[in-house]
Each structure stands twice: as C-alpha cells, then as structure tokens.
Amino acid sequence: MSIPSSTTPAIVYPETDGEPMAENTIQYRWIVTIKEGLEGVFESRPDVFVAADLFWYPVEGESEIRAAPDVMVVLGRPKRDRPSYMQWEEGGVPPDVVFEILSPSNRPTAMKDKLRFYEQYGVSEYYVYDPDKVEFKGFIRSDDALRPIPNTSEWTSPLLDVRFDLSGPELVILDPKGERFLTVQEIRMERDQERNRSERLAAQLRAAGIEPAS
C-alpha cells in the first residue's frame, strides 16, 4: 500500500514570463540608457544593485505576486548576478527607485496597477517616461504613499542624485557631475573617437622620433 507523501511541493519562482524586455527600439534604447547610466553613477558603490526587466518577488511563498520593472535600483544590496530579486533573501529590502518606459500598448489601467503595486511593496521613488509624447511623471513616497511630484521638468532624485531635464525635445538625464546619460551607441562612438585620437598622437610622436609611452 502506498503512503501519501506529506512533502509540500517546492514553490517555483519563474525567472521570465516569456515576454520581450521592450516592444520597440525606442523603449529598448531608453531602458538600456537608464540602466547603464545608473550603473555608471554607482560604479564605485558595491552596495547598490541596478537591474533591468528582472522579476521582483516581494512576498515569500507567493510566486504570483511579482513585478518586472523596466529598471530598478536597490540601495544597500550587493552587486551580483541574480535570477530574480527575492526580497526575503535580500534582508527584506525592496527596490528603492523604479523606472517604467511606456510603449504604445501600455494601458492606463495597467499603469495604475503598477503604481499601486510599487506603493504597496515599498518603492520610494517611481518614474514613468513616455518617449513618444515626451511626458515624464514622478512619484515620491510620503506618509506611506507614492504621491505625484508636482513639477518634474527639472527635478533631481533625492536618492539617486540624478537630474531630469525636459527643457529640450526629449528627456535628458544628468548624473551628479552634470554629464548626460549616453546611449550605448554614443558610448561606443566616444570610445572609438578616443582610441583614434590616441592612435593619431602616437603616430605623431613616432614621426618626431619619440616613442610613445605604453
């Protein structure tokens, strides 16, 4: 006679929902630009975790309660690879700052649900950018709620110390030194230009009979 097992099946926390990170190139470019820009801002901080399109599970044992912010920043948690962000394994620390980049398929009801989720589970700053309409909204935690920031046209994040500027044709994000967040393509172009300058200088030195320093 077989004896029924009393072992509780392990809860599975999916690492992906099968959906793409972005629906179009504009949304993808902004997600990567913000994520990589923030990685640069906190490059010297081993206790700041930045991720894009990563599942966040705030409640242990509840695999259906989850979100995948376009970009999230967690202060006070180590940089390391994670299949997902399980809050109970991270000292109970929720993402501090979350970004969402809108695409044409985003519906107001879905965005309201996201706002409620981030409010309920402890996000301190929440930013939403619509690159098609060039609209930028922000919410900041006050009295245990995420409340709209009245004017985000030239706003500095209290937690990130980055500034958002809407005075031009699109959103510009500036790091604490006042330098603009660059796209991956722009970063590559800058590196290529710097390499070309170094090669030209080395050639000029050799032509003058001077061996350039290695």
Image (spheres, rainbow, N blue to C red):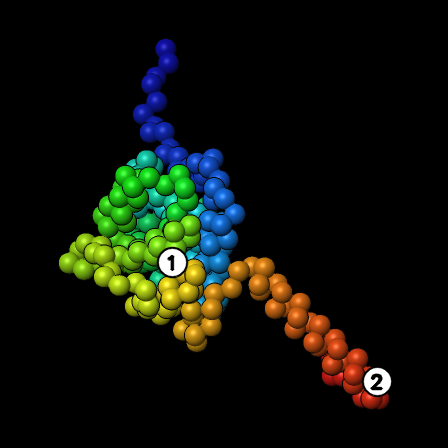
Amino acid under label 2?
Ala
Q: Quadrant of the N terminus?
A: top left
Residue at the image point whose x is 82% and y is 84% from the top: 206
- Residue 73 circle label: 1
Residue at the image point whose x is 43% and y is 70% from the top: 175
Q: Quadrant of the C terminus?
A: bottom right
SS for tag 1? Answer: strand
The answer to whether one can see residue 47 in this image is: no
* Disc nearest the viewer among 2 and 1: 2
Q: Residue 168, located in which quarter of the rendered image?
A: bottom left
Q: Residue 165, located in which quarter of the rendered image?
A: bottom left
Q: Position of residue 115 (x, y in %)?
A: 27, 47
Q: Residue furthest front?
A: 169
The answer to whether one can see residue 153 in this image is: yes
In screen coordinates, is 127 left or right of 196? left
Q: Position of residue 137 (x, y in %)?
A: 30, 56
- Viewer-nearest residue: 57 or 148: 148
* Mark 2–mark 1 distance (CA, rounded to whole Å): 50 Å
Q: Are marks 2 and 1 in contact (CB under 8 Å)?
A: no
**Where does label 2 land, which residue?**
207
